[in-house]
């Protein structure tokens, strides 16, 4: 449905997005993850035709952003991180105003607004000024705004930013409902939200794509290496590095914590070979005291940190 190829955006000497390419399928919920300044918002703004790319192309249903900008905008609903609302207006009046701007027919306008209010959980606050609403409800009004023209594609930039845990769950449920009928592209810093909501995740770092796939496929990819954490007492760092580093299947030994009489060690092992019994046998043959021995679970958070942390 959406094809992005070699997309780049420069701000003077800064390259915010650096030749990224990916496709988005119809009906997919795609999560765009990355640290601050990674290029997520810039990518979404180019996708929604609010920014012109420096180079590269975007096609939406065979429409090009170079020649069909207005037609593409009609296919999309866009909710920026801070919903641009007229806060002195009552919710109902605001939605009627947006409906008129978006060309919703007068005979179906009221029914359409009521449907959006139910979907976005706004029924009980339709009579209130937007300025009196909580951040969560303001986001819901922004979501109703973005969906007013019944877009095929919904683009959400940090839709749960600044919300409390209850509000996050509520917005997540709304996105899931919408995702049954529409293609959704969202950016987020909340990894648990991406894992719970998205069919597929793209991680961007310094303007480049560093990972692309479902949460499970990313975890499988990360499992090429097994990470074991070991705590020892009565061992010297040099001896541990030499002995455990010589065990078949151990690729790297890192001393995480070295206190008098105590060592925390991280072992990177080849996942294709079971090394735990050999590591245990090596430790058992010494006079070291083993106080902890556990496999590190690959979560989306650990994958994200490994791919985006400063080297």
Image (cartoon, grey):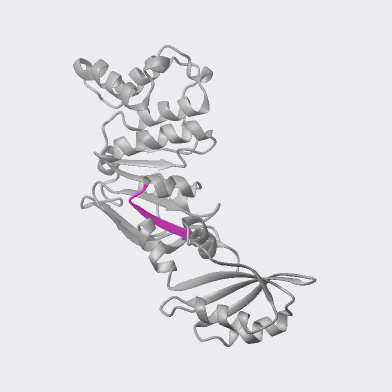
Q: Is residue 136 magenta?
A: no
Residue 281 vertical position relative to residue 203 in the rendered view, above or below: below
Instruction: Tell me which secondary structure the magenta stretch mostly adopts.
Output: strand
Residue most extreme to the top: 127
Magenta residues, start to end? 198-204
In percent of the image, x 74 and y 80: which residue is there? 236
In percent of the image, x 44 and y 14: which residue is there? 90
Quadrant of residue 174 in the image? top left
Residue 148 vertical position relative to residue 272 in the rendered view, above or below: above
Quadrant of residue 119 in the image? top left
State the residue in front, 277 or 219.
Answer: 277
Residue most extreme to the right: 260
- Residue 222, x across and y down, in percent: 44, 67
In percent of the image, x 58 and y 88: which residue is there? 246
Can residue 20 be seen in this snapshot? no
- Residue 157, x across and y down, in percent: 44, 42
- Residue 212, x across and y down, in percent: 38, 61
In the picture, measured across the screen, residue 92 lies left or right of residue 111, that is right
State the residue in front, 189 or 197.
Answer: 197
Marker count (numbered): 0
- Residue 305, x across and y down, in percent: 54, 60
Can residue 233 be seen in this snapshot? yes
Quadrant of residue 238 in the image? bottom right
State the residue in front, 189 or 76.
Answer: 189
In the rendered image, the quadrant that contains the C terminus is bottom right
In the picture, measured across the screen, residue 159 lies left or right of residue 294, that is left
């Amino acid at each position: 449905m959406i094809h992005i190829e070699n997309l780049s955006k420069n701000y003077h000497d800064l390259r915010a997005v650096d030749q990224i390419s990916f496709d988005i399928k119809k009906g997919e919920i795609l999560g765009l993850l990355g640290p601050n300044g990674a290029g997520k918002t810039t990518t979404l703004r180019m996708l929604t035709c609010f920014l012109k790319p420096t180079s590269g192309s975007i096609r939406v249903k065979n429409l090009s952003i170079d020649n069909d900008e207005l037609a593409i905008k009609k296919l999309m609903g866009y909710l920026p991180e801070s919903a641009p609302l007229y806060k002195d207006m009552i919710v109902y009046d605001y939605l009627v105003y947006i409906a008129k701007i978006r060309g919703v027919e007068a005979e179906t306008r009221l029914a359409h607004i009521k449907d959006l209010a139910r979907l976005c959980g706004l029924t009980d606050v339709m009579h209130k000024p937007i300025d009196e609403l909580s951040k969560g409800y303001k986001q819901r009004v922004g979501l109703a705004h973005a969906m007013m023209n019944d877009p095929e594609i919904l683009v959400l930039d940090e839709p749960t930013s600044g919300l409390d845990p209850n509000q996050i769950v509520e917005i997540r449920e709304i996105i899931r409902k919408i995702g049954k009928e529409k293609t959704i592209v969202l950016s987020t810093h909340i990894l648990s939200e991406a894992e719970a909501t998205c069919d597929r995740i793209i991680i961007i770092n310094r303007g480049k794509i560093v990972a692309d796939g479902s949460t499970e496929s990313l975890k499988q990819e990360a499992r090429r290496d097994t990470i074991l954490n070991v705590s020892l007492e009565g061992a010297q760092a040099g001896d541990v590095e030499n002995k455990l580093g010589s065990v078949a299947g151990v690729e790297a030994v890192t001393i995480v914590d070295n206190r008098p009489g105590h060592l925390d060690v991280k072992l990177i092992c080849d996942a294709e070979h079971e090394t735990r019994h050999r590591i245990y046998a090596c430790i058992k043959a010494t006079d070291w005291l083993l106080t902890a021995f556990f496999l590190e679970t690959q979560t989306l958070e650990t994958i994200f940190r490994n791919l985006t942390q400063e080297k």
